[in-house]
Amino acid sequence: MNSDELKHNEVPETHQNGEQPVAPEAPSSQEVNRLSALASQSSVANSTPLPTTDSTDKPKPSSKRALIVGAAVALLIGGLLLGWVPRWRQSWSTADDTSQLAIPSVSVVSPAPGTNRDSLVLPAEVRPWLEASIFARANGYLKSWQADIGAHVEAGQQLAVIETPDLDQQLEQAKAQLALAQANLHLAEVTDHRWKELLKTASVSEQAADEKAAARETAAASVEADRANMRRLQELVSFQRVTAPFAGTVTIRAVDVGDLIVAGSGGKQLFHLAQADKLRVYVRVPQTASAGIAAGQVANLSIPEHADHPFPAKVVTTSESISATSRTLLVQLEVDNSQHQILPYSYGEVRFDEHAGNPALTLPANTLLFRAEGLQVGVVNSNALVELRKVQIGRDFGDRPRFRPDGRSHRRCYACRSRHRESV
């Protein structure tokens, strides 16, 4: 018999109560999915028994594939949601920030006129009115010194004494040489006188008489040469006494008793003398400000130890030329120091007051635009539009350069961000 006949001849089992069981039908895939969802969400078993399939019955392959596909789709959708939502929020935030930053932020300031405190202040070199480095004029040894540093001396006052044994001997030799020359001159004069008398009686020739006259003149010239040499040595001996060339203060004493003294500037400096009743103040003015400096102009000299008490100064002269190395104008000023409140060679600052007829404007440093066309600032015109205009810096104070407008009066300027200054 075939399989169909075997199934037809099978006798179903009969329960004790005489009822024959009916085999349940296999549930569809939709019912399996619904039942699985209800079983997973419920923590307590339902009182009504769920229909089940016999252990011998197996689900169809199509139902398994449907479950797997459904689970994969659910996982894919969840993964897409988890990855896309944060990116979407970040993109939205970035777009919002970009739209906000695209709006230019412009800070408008007004230039301030220059004040006295913005005057031209330059470092100054304070030097004495007269100063001299004193060297020896005679070789020898320092015998003694009479003036130390800080001593106020008068013109011609003795500072030191040099012992010159070699020079003394040279002077004695020159005196003896002069005496010898004078003796030769006396003999030449007597001989010349005698030969002139003999020439009158024709006892000697004129040639011989002329030779004796020339010998007298030669002896006289030799006497004058020896006398000049003696005076020279006497002058050198007088330099044994080192004296002050002018009234002033000894600022340096570089020798002591017993030191070897060599004459001339090649030797050691003995003393340095400075006269500080008046002071010379030297300032180097930048080329851009040199046009406002003239002789007779009044300025103020400030010294750190007298910061609250500036000293009046007056421009005496200028070099009238710009230095090729520093591009500055050397200016000399005169300061009265009769009270000796300012020490020579001190550091100071000279303040030149601004001219009332040449005012300047002051702007913050962040308003300047350094561009290929030159230094520019943005100016708000009457139509509330920003224009870029060239300016020229007069002085730079670091955070607030002072400038003069180029042709037009700039009254309102701005400082903006570099990324949108082209489009403002």
Image: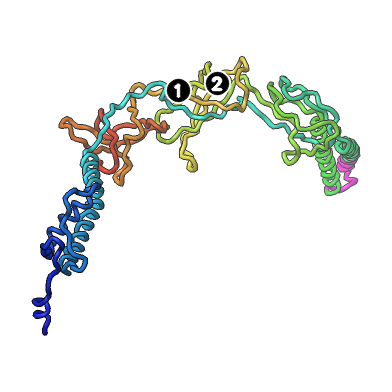
Query: How far from the left and from the top, in percent, is residue 132?
Result: 67, 30
Q: Calculate the distance from the C-alpha at mark 2 to the C-alpha at mark 1.
A: 13 Å
Label 2 packing within 10 angstroms: few (<14), some (14-19), many (20+): many
Q: Are marks 2 and 1 in contact (CB under 8 Å)?
A: no
Q: Nearer the viewer, residue 166 or 46?
A: 46
Over which residues does the magenta segment extend? 191-206
Q: Vertical placement of 82 versus 65: above or below? A: above
Element at label 1? loop
Asked if one can make out residue 273 in the rendered structure from this viewpoint, the answer is: yes
Determine the image quadrant of residue 3.
bottom left
Q: Vertical placement of 266 versus 38: above or below? A: above
Q: Nearer the viewer, residue 153 or 202?
A: 153
Query: How far from the left and from the top, in percent, is residue 343?
Result: 62, 22
Element at label 2? strand
- Residue type marked 1: Gln
- Residue type marked 2: Val
Q: The N terminus is located in which quarter?
A: bottom left
The residue carrying mark 2 is: 335
Q: Is residue 185 magenta?
A: no
Label 1 packing within 10 angstroms: few (<14), some (14-19), many (20+): some
Q: Tag on residue 297?
A: 1
